[in-house]
Image: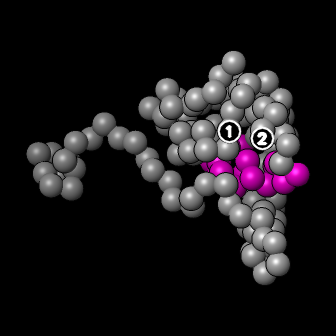
Amino acid sequence: MIRSLQHLSRFIALGSLILSNNRLQWIELQHIRHMFILDLRLDGNTILDADPNYRQHVLDCLPRIWMCDGIFVSTAERNQIDEFFTQSSLKLKPVRHKLSRDIFMPTNLKDRATNGLFG
């Protein structure tokens, strides 16, 4: 059973990532938040599946996936999710984002800001 996604954080893009039927928690998605993923499967993770807003949270946590659990993610759906969180913030018991909205992009470039691209 997979419990951590930290080892995947060095990748920038993946075609398919099947993480179904594991023991992932929401916080683990931060390790793949920066990645472009064509097809992500997360179904069967009991902690994630228990959330009544599972799909909204997955798409909010992972803004660069194209398919989630076999279902294409459209621009319209992404806009609906933004609206969902906006409307929820106005309620007495708002639905909160599972992860920070900031995305960290790992890089192997060192001292880029200090030395520039060419040293």
Q: Nearer the viewer, residue 48 or 18?
A: 48
Badge 1: residue crowd in 10 Å (few <14, some 14–19, many ≥20): some
* Residues under numbered marks 2 and 1 in contact, where contact means CB atoms less than 8 Å apart: yes
Give the image location of residue 101, x and y in percent. Answer: 57, 61
Q: Which residue is mark 2?
A: 48
> Considering only order in the chain, which callout, 1 or 2, is on the residue closer to the N terminus?
1
Q: Is residue 100 left or right of residue 46?
A: left
Query: Is residue 20 visible to the viewer in this orientation of the structure?
Result: yes
Q: Is residue 75 above or below residue 94?
A: above
Badge count: 2
User: Which quadrant would residue 89 be assigned to in this image?
Assistant: bottom right
Q: Is residue 111 left or right of residue 3?
A: left
User: Which quadrant would residue 96 be assigned to in this image?
Assistant: bottom right
Give the image location of residue 92, x and y in percent. Answer: 82, 78
Specify start and end residues of the magenta stretch as a single range.
52-66
Q: Is residue 14 left or right of residue 104?
A: right
Q: Which residue is mark 1?
A: 25
